[in-house]
Each structure stands twice: as structure tokens, then as C-alpha cells.
Image (cartoon, rainbow, N blue to C red):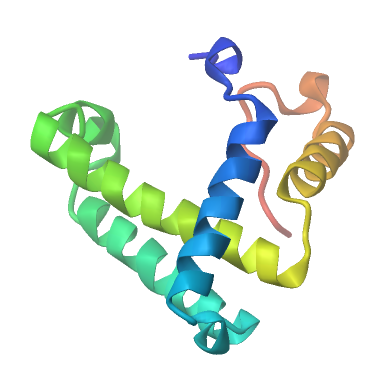
Amino acid sequence: MDHADDAQPEPQLDELTRLMREFSDERDWGQFQDPKSLILALVGEVGELAELFQWVPADRAVDQFAEPGRHARAGEEIADVLLYLLRLADVLGVDVMEAARSKQAAARVRFPTEQYRASAPFKE
């Protein structure tokens, strides 16, 4: 499924980053949001997301997470991951969109379509 038409404009990520910065500043939480602490929080949230899928058979995950309750829980955890990731990028001064575009361009070169169509890459 191609979601290119569903892509949100870049300013929404900038806006979300700004809102996260304001939220943190209003609470004087910057003192706790060093890169290491943010990475640990991010890993914790990824763990919570993984826990939702832990015992779900891979071939049934999409269907099972279409159920409204599970869909909402997955959305909450995905949001937590995104928010911590954006906060980490903000603290480090990383332009998330530029980094993602650069990484995607490198992946296109590294994994040419004709060589990798319907074939998962693996590490040697």
C-alpha cells in the first residue's frame, strides 16, 4: 500500500517539535532530557510497542490491529515513540526530515530495485 498521497507536510513535524519543546520548557524538564535519558525513554516506548505485538502471529498482525482497541493502543505507543524521537532530534539539533531524506537516498543506491525486488536484504 502506497501512502505517498497521505504524507503530511513537513511543517507539521516542525510544529510537533516546537510543541514538545514548549511542553518540556513549561515544566523545566530540559534538565532531565539529555540525549542519554531521551534514548532510554525512546527504547522503553519501543519496548511497549513491541510488547503489544509480542505473541501476535506475523501473518495476522495487520488484521488483529485493525480491531479498534488494539488499533488505538498501537497508535498511542507509536505516538510516544515519535514524540521521544522528535525531542531527541531537537536536543541534538538534528533535522529529522533532512536526515531521513539522506538515509532514503542512500538506501535507494544500496538496494537497487532490480537486485532486491521481493527479496529481503540480510547481513553477512
Compared across the picture, whether 1 is left or right of 86 comes to left
Front position in the image: 124 or 98:
98
Where's residue 95, x and y in %? 78, 52
In the displayed structure image, the side of residue 62 where residue 109 appears, left or right: right
Q: How many marks?
A: 0
Decide: is 101 above or below 38.
Answer: above
Residue at 48%, 14% in the rendered image? 1
Nearest the eye: 38 or 120: 38
- Please determine whether, in this image, residue 95 is positioned above or below residue 47: above
Quarter occupied by residue 103: top right
Q: Point out the residue furthest to the front here.
A: 26
The relative height of residue 62 versus residue 72 in the rendered view (above or below) is above
Q: Quadrant of residue 45?
A: bottom left
* Quadrant of the image containing the C terminus: bottom right
Q: Position of residue 110 (x, y in %)?
A: 86, 40
Residue that lies at the very extreme toward the top in this rendered image: 5
Residue 74 placement, left or right of 38: left
Residue, x 67% and y 42% (percent of image)?
121
Q: Farthest bottom residue?
A: 31
> Which one is nearer the viewer's eye here, 115 or 44?
44
Whole-percent x and y of residue 57? 22, 42
